[in-house]
Image (spheres, grey):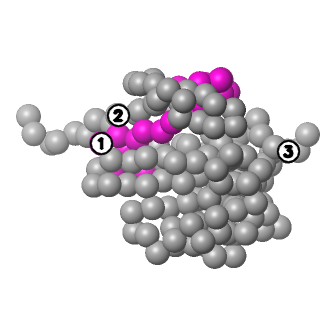
Amino acid sequence: MQPLTYQLLPMTAELIPQIAALECSCFSHPATQEMLEGVLWNESAVIIAAVDGQGQVLGYAGLQTVLDEGYIDNIAVRPDCRRQGVADALVAAFVRFGQAKLAFLTLEVRASNAPAIALYEKHGFRPVGRRPGYYDHPKEDAILMTLEFTHETGCA
């Protein structure tokens, strides 16, 4: 199998239809194209996409920030591109951003999604809580995971 070749790029209006389609295939309550368009004008939110050489979106991740807090809202990868490092690269990009700018990153993940939990733990996220019945279709708890950053103050 050839390794996937892609770039991580900020979402543009041209990528929204592909990201919306991926939302529909991955989530029981997908964001609409209009909701995704709103991210383009929201200074506290960003979506990054893994885009191949033909302009196809292989996966994407969204981040919202409030002051020095970050919330990863969705990470999705096309089924045919899973287990090939796309989600890892997307999470790593937000972790690098968090290390530079944030006090912590947090996210929710389905309690049964062992591969995603393992990915987040690999990047330093730790379970900090549970949200009973958070997900629908099927009804399931969410595990709340957080990665805290320590920043040097330069003071002795």
Residue at horizontal 83 percent and vertical 67 percent from the top: 54
Residue at horizontal 64 percent and vertical 64 percent from the top: 32
At label 1, the amino acid type is Ala
At label 2, the amino acid type is Glu
Position in image of residue 6 (x %, y %): 73, 56
State the mark number for residue 62: none
Q: Which residue is mark 3?
A: 80
- Circles 2 and 3: CB distance less than 8 Å? no
Front position in the image: 110 or 152: 110
Does residue 36 lie above or below 90 as drawn? below
Distance between the alpha carbons at the discs numbered 1 and 2: 6 Å
Callout 2: SS:
strand
Callout 3: SS:
helix
Residue found at the very far right of the displayed protein:
1
Q: Earlier in the sequence, mark 1 or mark 2?
A: 1
Question: Can I make out residue 142 in this image?
Answer: yes
Position in image of residue 35 (x %, y %): 56, 66
- The stretch in magenta equals 96-122
Query: In the rendered structure, does residue 118 fall within the stretch colored magenta?
Result: yes
Position in image of residue 65 (x %, y %): 37, 54
Distance between the alpha carbons at the discs numbered 2 and 3: 32 Å
- Circles 1 and 3: CB distance less than 8 Å? no
- Circles 1 and 2: CB distance less than 8 Å? yes
Q: Quadrant of residue 49?
A: bottom right
Distance between the alpha carbons at the discs numbered 1 and 3: 35 Å
At label 3, the amino acid type is Asp
State the mark number for residue 148: 2
Q: Which residue is mark 1?
A: 103
Residue at horizontal 37 percent and vertical 44 percent from the top: 99
Which corner quadrant holds the N terminus? top right
